[in-house]
Image (cartoon, rainbow, N blue to C red):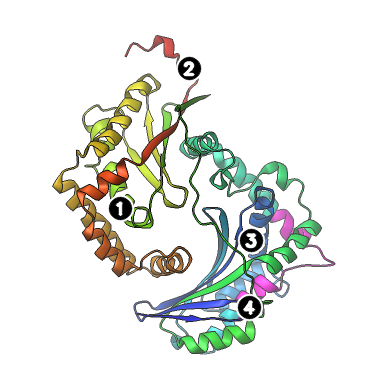
């Protein structure tokens, strides 16, 4: 693989030249500091841009054009990273050497069409596309409570730190959605293009000098911006743990527990904590949480821990009977305490390293994962895959214990069966 950067006046281009894949990928990332008052407009805008364009002014015509380009797969994603928001337009397409025409040029032109030639009439987005996207967003926002665990996690985050960027809902807000008009959305589009910083990432068996030349000629953005971004934030800590219950109609209660990570350095954040999370509850049947909650006490079917690197947070999730709430919390605390006391076996460390290196090896064979690692290498100075594999092997038990001591309990949230009465709990 060959990594290469092309700096420019309107965007920077980053490339990975590799012959591992038959297809090629382009990701065009627009990024800015996240604002709660703008998030619904931003999500709406990203969806409407990929619904239709000025030239392909219905979704049917838009999809037909993608099919003509050897089934070009073009879509958009929005991601929060620390205090920033990334809107990424992705194109997955056949390597041009297998095509009859100049497919690379056509793909870049289609990306330009989607991003820079929206379906706008008289300074307003097309009403048909607007209504389609709005209705889809209403359904998506309302679907939150269809997933009890997702709802519980969102409520946990809200209770940990209501002012955190992590608490901004990536699907948007119904009350803000109702205020958006085709005219106000187009006004926001112009702000988006003018103010967001744009980077382009490309992976595949391509002549990257040619890719750069074509983008410079076709993708005509305004001059480059100098936005400053905050990719990590440490959420509020508490002197006293906060416990919150919410009643609902469930056969099983959802328990979520949030732990702060205090003052991690870059090595701990990027390397050590990933290993520690696997040992705690990162998917293995031998994890501390699985052993304590399921194997030894049969309190749940599954339990896991999620490491939110850019927010210095661990979220532990499980489904339990409400009557077992106190016991489950006690066992979760015990699992963390085991780590702090150094109750970590040599085999646990070996297995965690093996699991994470096997995962990295798999990622090396997935274009999306390779590109994502490169993106975070550029933005967050995350080590590239081969370097990460070496660093994981160096982690010691002492490193793990030192990080475990930086874990602090913040908030416990229980989404419970409304018919359960704690006074009747005999355990």
* Alpha-carbon span between mark 3 and mark 4: 20 Å
Q: Give the SS element for disc 2.
A: loop
Relative to 33, 127 lies left or right:
right
**In the rendered image of this protein, does residue 176 appear above or below residue 359?**
above
**Mark nearer the viewer, 3 or 4:** 4
Res 52 seen here: no
25 in relation to 425, above or below: below
Mark 2 near mark 4, Cβ–Cβ under 8 Å? no
360 within the magenta span? no
x, y percentage for residue 58? 70, 67
**Mark 4 or mark 2, which is nearer the start of the sequence?**
4
**Which is nearer the N-term, disc 2 or disc 3?**
3
- Quadrant of res 197: bottom right
User: Which mark, residue 10?
Assistant: 4
Which region of the structure is painted magenta? 109-132
Vertical order, 283 against 162 (above or below):
below
- Residue sitting at 14 percent across and 48 percent down? 347
Q: What residue sits 56% from the left and 60% below the top?
A: 229
The disc label shown at residue 46, or none:
3
Q: Position of residue 113 (x, y in %)?
A: 66, 75
Judge whether residue 372 can be spotted in this image: yes
User: Spatial distance from mark 3 to mark 1, Cα to Cα?
Assistant: 36 Å
> Would residue 119 be counted in the magenta stretch?
yes
Sequence order check: which comes first, mark 3 or mark 1?
3
Residue behind mark 2: 419
C-alpha gap between disc 1 and disc 4: 37 Å
Q: Quadrant of the C terminus?
A: top left
Residue for badge 1: 272
For discs 2 and 1, the disc positioned in front in the rendered view: 1
């Amino acid at each position: 693989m060959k990594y290469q950067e092309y700096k420019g006046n309107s965007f920077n281009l980053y490339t990975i030249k590799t012959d591992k894949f038959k297809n090629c990928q382009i990701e065009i990332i627009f990024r800015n500091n996240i604002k709660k008052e703008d998030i619904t407009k931003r999500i709406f805008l990203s969806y409407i841009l990929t619904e239709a364009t000025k030239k392909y002014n219905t979704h049917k015509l838009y999809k037909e054009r993608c099919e003509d380009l050897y089934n070009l797969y073009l879509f958009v994603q929005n991601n929060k990273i620390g205090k920033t928001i990334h809107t990424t337009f992705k194109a997955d397409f056949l390597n041009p050497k297998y095509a009859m025409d100049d497919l690379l040029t056509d793909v870049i032109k289609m990306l330009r069409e989607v991003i820079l030639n929206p379906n706008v009439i008289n300074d307003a987005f097309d009403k048909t596309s607007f209504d389609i996207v709005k209705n889809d967003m209403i359904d998506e926002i309302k679907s939150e409570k269809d997933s009890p665990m997702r709802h519980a996690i969102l409520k946990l985050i809200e209770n940990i730190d209501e002012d955190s960027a992590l608490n901004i809902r990536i699907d948007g807000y119904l009350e803000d959605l109702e205020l958006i008009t085709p005219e106000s959305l187009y006004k926001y589009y112009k702000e988006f293009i003018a103010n967001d910083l744009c980077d382009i990432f490309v992976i595949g068996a391509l002549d990257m000098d040619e890719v750069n030349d074509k983008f410079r000629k076709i993708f005509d953005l305004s001059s480059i911006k100098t936005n400053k971004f905050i990719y990590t934030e440490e959420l509020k800590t508490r002197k006293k743990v906060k416990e919150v219950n919410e009643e609902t109609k469930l056969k099983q209660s959802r328990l979520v527990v949030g732990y702060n990570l205090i003052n991690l350095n870059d090595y701990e954040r990027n390397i050590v904590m990933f290993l520690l999370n696997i040992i705690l509850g990162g998917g293995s049947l031998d994890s501390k949480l699985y052993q304590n909650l399921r194997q030894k006490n049969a309190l749940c079917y599954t339990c896991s821990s999620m490491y939110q690197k850019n927010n210095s947070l661990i979220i532990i999730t499980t489904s339990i009977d409400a009557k077992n709430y106190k016991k489950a919390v006690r066992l979760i605390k015990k699992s963390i305490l085991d780590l702090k006391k150094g109750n970590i076996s040599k085999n646990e460390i070996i297995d965690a390293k093996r699991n994470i290196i096997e995962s990295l090896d798999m990622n090396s064979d997935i274009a999306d994962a390779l590109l994502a690692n490169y993106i975070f290498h550029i933005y967050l100075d995350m080590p590239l895959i081969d370097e990460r594999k070496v660093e994981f092997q160096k982690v010691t038990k002492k490193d793990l214990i030192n990080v475990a001591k930086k874990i602090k309990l913040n908030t416990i949230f229980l989404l419970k069966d409304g018919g359960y009465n704690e006074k009747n709990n005999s355990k």
